[in-house]
Amino acid sequence: MLQRLLNQQDKLSALWQQLHLGQVGVEVHPSCLIKEQVKAKLGSANGARGQIQLAQQVQLEQGVLLHAWGGRITISENVFIGPYTVIYGHGGVTIGKDSLIAMHCRILSSNHTIPDRSRRIRWESDVHLPTTIGEDVWLGAGVTVLGGVTIGNGCVVGAGAVVTKDLPPYSIAVGVPVKVVRTRA
């Protein structure tokens, strides 16, 4: 009896989270499972409103932060995003189906320019750099993916890695900066 009540409570909480994200303009498939404290902002840039799209069976764990900043975040079918992951979509982020993003990951799609000393860094505009994560990718805990990177289908990226360059499909990569150590058989 208690377990049934807890399951109903989880379903109601997920529905509430879906409705909340929908109110801010996120496209949420009804089959998505959205946990507590998930935040999303579309923002706008150059007169365009940001977009966030969650396909069927996407699961967002507690504390996930999705900020489009006027860009686009597209999360495909059956993607799991672990607690406290942050995704910034300035330049566009696409995550392929069946991918697993562990807790505390950071996925970026922009960078700053480095001006000469006469100008403040903060005054410079962002450089938009589209980021693509393929299908069936596993990002370990605390991975950072920098803007402009493409991670090929089937890649595994070890915990704490910083992905600064493209990874070929089925690579296993670790380290700071990331280095391919082998290929999935």
Image (spheres, grey):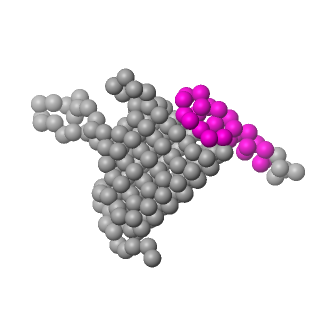
Residue 119, position as x, y percentages in the image: 15, 30
Q: Which residues are magenta?
A: 6-30
Image coordinates of residue 159 in percent, x first then y, are 43, 62
- In this view, the residue in front, 111 or 130, is 130
- Is residue 21 inside the magenta stretch? yes
Quarter that holds the C terminus: bottom left
The image quadrant that residue 179 belongs to is bottom left
Q: Residue furthest right?
A: 1
Where is residue 182? Give x, y as percent: 37, 74
Q: Main secondary structure of the magenta part?
A: helix
Please tell me which residue is depicted at 38% across the width and 58% down the height of the picture: 151
Relative to 126, 69 lies left or right: right
162 shown above or below 86: below
Image quadrant in which you'd find residue 156: bottom left
Image spot of residue 57 (x, y percent): 62, 49
- Please say whether residue 24 is one of the residues in the magenta stretch: yes
- Residue shown at the point (52%, 54%) measured from the top left: 97
| Quadrant in which residue 157 is drawn | bottom left
Count of picture labels: 0
